[in-house]
C-alpha cells in the first residue's frame, strides 16, 4: 500500500482477522489517503476510517462503502434508465 499511497510514513499492523491499524507519521498523508479511498488490496476492498481509541471497533460500520464505478463500451442505444438501473443492481 505504501507504493499506491505514495508514502513511506505508514506502519500497518493486523489487530485481528479483517481489522488492521495504520499509523501515519504525517497527518496530511492520513487525511489524503482516507479522503481518496476506498482502496483495493489483493482484490479486497480496503475501507479506512479515522477511529478514536475510546470508541470500541464494533461501533464503526465497515459493512458498506460508496465508490465510483465507470463502465465503458456501452452502446448509446442502451442509455436508458432501465439499463442503468439494472447495471447498478448488478454492481451492488
Image (cartoon, helix red, strand yellow):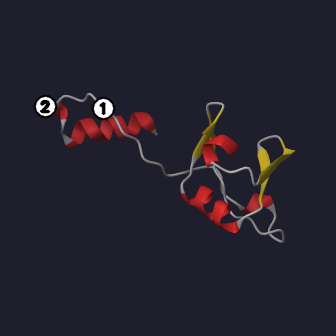
Disc 1: which residue: 72
Q: Position of residue 42 (x, y in %)?
A: 66, 31
Q: Is residue 83 above or below residue 63?
A: above
Disc 2: which residue: 77
Q: Is residue 31 above or below residue 42?
A: below
Task: Report if residue 1 is visible in the image.
Answer: no
Point out the residue furthest to the bottom here: 54
Residue 73 shown left or right of residue 60 in the figure: left
- Residue 33 position by quadrant: bottom right
Closer to the camera in the image, 36 or 9: 9
Looking at the rendering, in which quadrant would you find the N terminus? Answer: top right
Q: Position of residue 23 (x, y in %)?
A: 79, 58
Residue at 77%, 69% (x, y): give it.
52
| SS at mark 1 in the image | loop
Residue 91 shown left or right of residue 21 in the figure: left
- Give the crowd class for mark 1: few <14, some 14-19, many >=20 residues within 10 Å: few
- Mark 2 or 1: in front is 1
- Residue 2 position by quadrant: top right
- Residue 76 position by quadrant: top left
Amino acid at each position: 500500500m505504501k507504493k499506491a499511497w505514495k508514502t513511506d510514513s505508514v506502519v500497518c499492523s493486523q489487530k485481528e482477522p479483517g481489522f488492521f491499524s495504520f499509523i501515519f507519521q504525517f497527518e496530511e498523508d492520513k487525511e489524503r489517503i482516507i479522503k481518496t479511498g476506498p482502496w483495493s488490496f489483493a482484490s479486497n476492498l480496503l475501507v479506512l476510517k479515522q477511529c478514536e481509541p475510546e470508541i470500541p471497533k464494533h461501533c464503526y460500520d465497515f459493512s458498506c462503502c460508496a465508490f465510483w464505478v465507470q463502465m465503458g463500451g456501452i452502446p448509446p442505444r442502451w442509455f436508458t434508465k432501465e439499463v442503468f438501473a439494472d447495471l447498478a443492481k448488478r454492481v451492488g
